[in-house]
Amino acid sequence: MQKQAVTFNPAQAPAIAPSSGNPAPAARSALGDVFAVAGAPVPFERNSEIFGEAEPADYFYQVVGGAVRTYKVLEDGRRQIGAFYLPGDVFGLEAGEAHGFSAEAVMRSTVRVARRSIVLAMAARNPDLGAALWQAAAGGMRAAQEHMLVLGRKSAEERVASFLLDIGQRGGCREIIELPMSRQDMADYLGLTIETVSRTLTHLQASGVISMHGCRSIHLNRPEALAELCE
Amino acid sequence: MQKQAVTFNPAQAPAIAPSSGNPAPAARSALGDVFAVAGAPVPFERNSEIFGEAEPADYFYQVVGGAVRTYKVLEDGRRQIGAFYLPGDVFGLEAGEAHGFSAEAVMRSTVRVARRSIVLAMAARNPDLGAALWQAAAGGMRAAQEHMLVLGRKSAEERVASFLLDIGQRGGCREIIELPMSRQDMADYLGLTIETVSRTLTHLQASGVISMHGCRSIHLNRPEALAELCE
DNA sequence: CGGGATATTGATTGATTTCAATGTGAGTGG
DNA sequence: CCACTCACATTGAAATCAATCAATATCCCG
């Protein structure tokens, strides 16, 4: 376990995206700089493992290109995806000695990998970086809470609508979405089956709220209608 | 409703299970010391608010006695409880400027409240404390991931079994549980209705896995059977 | 001994899953 | 260039688990 003096500076904390599902929005902060300096870019094939549950958590990660999923599985194979990480997002930011979940590349991706001990040492001297680490961790916590509400209390249609809005916002363009993940990934993130996801998308398209051009490309015709669907 | 001192003894809390759902296990660390020094004990009535969503996050909290729930609600009233905190547990540990969820006392409770700026200032000089803050935050993250698996992928019976085991482990005594929360709280934590929770408990009792002595007192007759039910 | 909140139990409904085809699209090799 | 294949997605019908609706039942507490 580390005992670096992470310098938590209470003073600042730059306004992070209000309640976006973005798991780690602190990309453009001091943390981003660290990865630019101390992070080695590593390519990952589609579906390849980045780290496994219970493995030592010796590194921090930042998505450069592509997309990453973190997940847990039950013995019988049921899988729950905890979060998707898109370019700029930071993940694997755990304080414990071991990872609590696994991470895989959703598609061919590039990830910058920074040795944890180095980042923490830098954080000890740079208050902004310490704060950025907090930001990232807290962003993950907030996204997790938000997602619990989705999983515990929302209907299938509400779940899909929430997902589309979230991905749309994080993807930069609010209206045209290029999904990096399969229907199975979406289903395992939303706590549904692929059939239900598919049917729900079809229904949203039939009602004119979205249009699909191939299953990975989705146009949000009426985002405000989606927002209403989220309750 | 009774206000009898449900016997969660803050002093004990023996070796907590490794990957228990315990949201913030770092109680006996440097963080515990901080609360002992810098934390003012504050009493809260049953169901009273400790902080609200979107309020400034100027304090950190530690449960001394009683129990606390954090939650989010949808506009139409659907509620999802994100976590329960028992004596020793730390909560409200957010890096952002505002809380991402609300917190209430489940029962008459005492909570130590420490000014965030003070704790962070201490952390800047005490590496162990900085690490402890990380531990607590990461513990929360881990518990959230675990709970997402419950909410997204487990059946009603599996959810209730997971819950009983988790509370049993955290409560100290592994076999006799005094629930501090109502059925509605359990339901809102597990993403179920009170009827389903009630029925499931009745069924578990009928199959001899548990016994109930009043709805708040549950004896785990065969914890290993519960563990199997979790998959 | 009520009285009101909370919990249990029962009957029914309904959303989502499961099971089962069918459709589509990208990559391969003839 | 086209047939083929394999993975993935969509669609349909039936089954199922949990939610909903509706009574009781129990337990604090005054």
Image (cartoon, coloured by chain):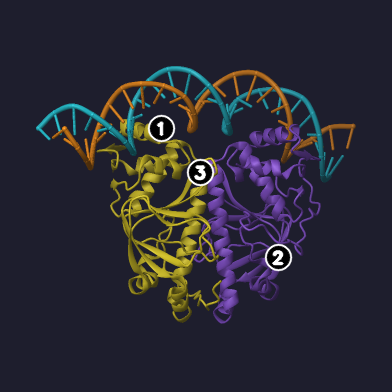
Chain colours: A yellow, B purple, C orange, D cyan
Count neighbours of disc 2 (C-alpha within 10 A) and say few if under 14, some if 14 to 19, many if 20 or more. Answer: some
Q: Quadrant of residue B155?
A: top right
Name the residue tied to disc 2.
B42
Which residue type does callout 3 highlight? Leu
- In this rendering, which labeled residue sits more in front, label 3 or label 1? 1
Count neighbours of disc 1 (C-alpha within 10 A) and say few if under 14, some if 14 to 19, many if 20 or more. Answer: few
| Residue B95 position in % (x across, y down) | 50, 66
Numbered mark located on residue A151 in the image = 3
Chain letter behind tag 1? A
- In this rendering, which labeled residue sits more in front, label 1 or label 2? 1
Point 69% across, 71% down: residue: B40
Which of marks 1 and 3 precedes in the sequence? 3
Chain letter behind tag 2? B
Q: Nearer the viewer, residue B214 or A15?
A: B214
| Residue B70 position in % (x across, y down) | 60, 54
- Is D4 displayed left or right of B193 in the figure? left
Point 72% across, 45% down: residue: B223
| Mark 3 and mark 1: Cα distance apart in space | 17 Å
- Is B181 displayed left or right of A185 in the figure? right
Q: Are marks 1 and 2 in contact (CB under 8 Å)?
A: no
Residue B58 visible? The answer is no
Q: Are marks 3 and 2 in contact (CB under 8 Å)?
A: no
Numbered mark located on residue A195 in the image = 1
Q: Nearer the viewer, residue C22 or A165?
A: C22
